[in-house]
Image (spheres, helix red, strand yellow):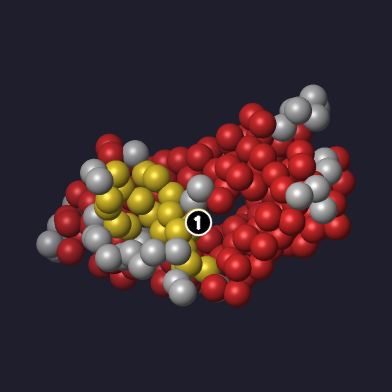
Amino acid sequence: MTYSISLKIQPTTYQRFETIHQKLNAGETESQSKALGDNLADIACEILDQVFGQMARMNKSGDNESEKIIQQIRETTRKYMPWSVSFFGNDRLVPMVNYLYGRFYSEDGQHYMHYPIDASLATDLLAYVNQMKEGQNQYVPLALKAFTQVVDAGVTHLVREPKKMLKFNMVVDKTLTGVINLTTQLGYKRFDKLGKIYDAQSMSQYFDHFMVFLNNEPVLRKA
């Protein structure tokens, strides 16, 4: 069985990306790097808010730490995403944009960005979530570990792989790798902390929210 994570993208955001994709593949001479950088930052922030913003709002710990971390990641994304593509002419951007275009599909008029996850990882996560709903606290760390792996697969497919395609020089590549590692670790450490704050039944609400994005149907429709 094929599993993937599907994330909604706003119509105007997708249309901007599609326009850039069309221009680049048509040989447009006017630089698209700024428009693309801003658009990719919007896509990333929509995904961040959609998945983790809602989870942060569900957090009742009272310290607002989750919201602060999400805001920090959002600000870092808006700083470095446009900067990272600003180095390149249109021809260098085409392979990455075509790759990302392949990650979109549409269904019932809604545009989605998706990425695949390992079937065994998905089935493990589903099993752990079911055990947590029954109050089995020992499954919380296992579920969080699987959840982190699912999220990291998204970082790989939607951030790390596109970054490789741009073939940055060593200095810029090292900078961006450090930024990616820092922001992901901020989030992953927060996941781990939540597991120490809440019991299985309390954590289930977070996983119920995230499991909405899990899809076990093959993606057939292009955006």
Q: In the figure, residue 61 lies in which quadrant?
A: top right
The reply, left or right, for residue 61 in relation to residue 31 is right
Q: Residue at x 56, y 51 (%)?
A: 211
* For residue 37, above or below residue 152: above
Residue under the image location 80 percent in, 58 percent down? 139
| Quarter of the view holding residue 215 | bottom left
Which residue position is annotated with label 1? Answer: 214
Q: Is residue 7 above or below residue 221?
A: above
Please indicate whether residue 14 sits to the left or right of residue 163 in the image: left
Q: Nearer the viewer, residue 141 or 136?
A: 136
Q: Residue at x 77, y 42 (%)?
A: 201
Q: Is residue 110 visible to us here?
A: yes
Q: Where is residue 120 shown, x and y percent of the image?
A: 60, 74
Provide residue 12's location: percent of width, then percent of height.
27, 37
Image vertical order of residue 1 relative to residue 69, above or below: below
Tell me the element at label 1: strand
Question: Can you give x and y, in whole percent of width and height, for residue 190 in the image?
Answer: 76, 46
Pick the residue in front: 217 or 145.
217
Q: What kind of residue is marked 1?
A: Leu
> From the viewer's perspective, is 76 left or right of 195?
left
Q: Residue at x 80, y 48 (%)?
A: 135
10 Å neighbourhood of mark 1: few (<14), some, or many (≥20)? some
Q: Quadrant of the C terminus?
A: bottom left
Q: Is residue 70 visible?
A: no
Q: Residue furthest top?
A: 62
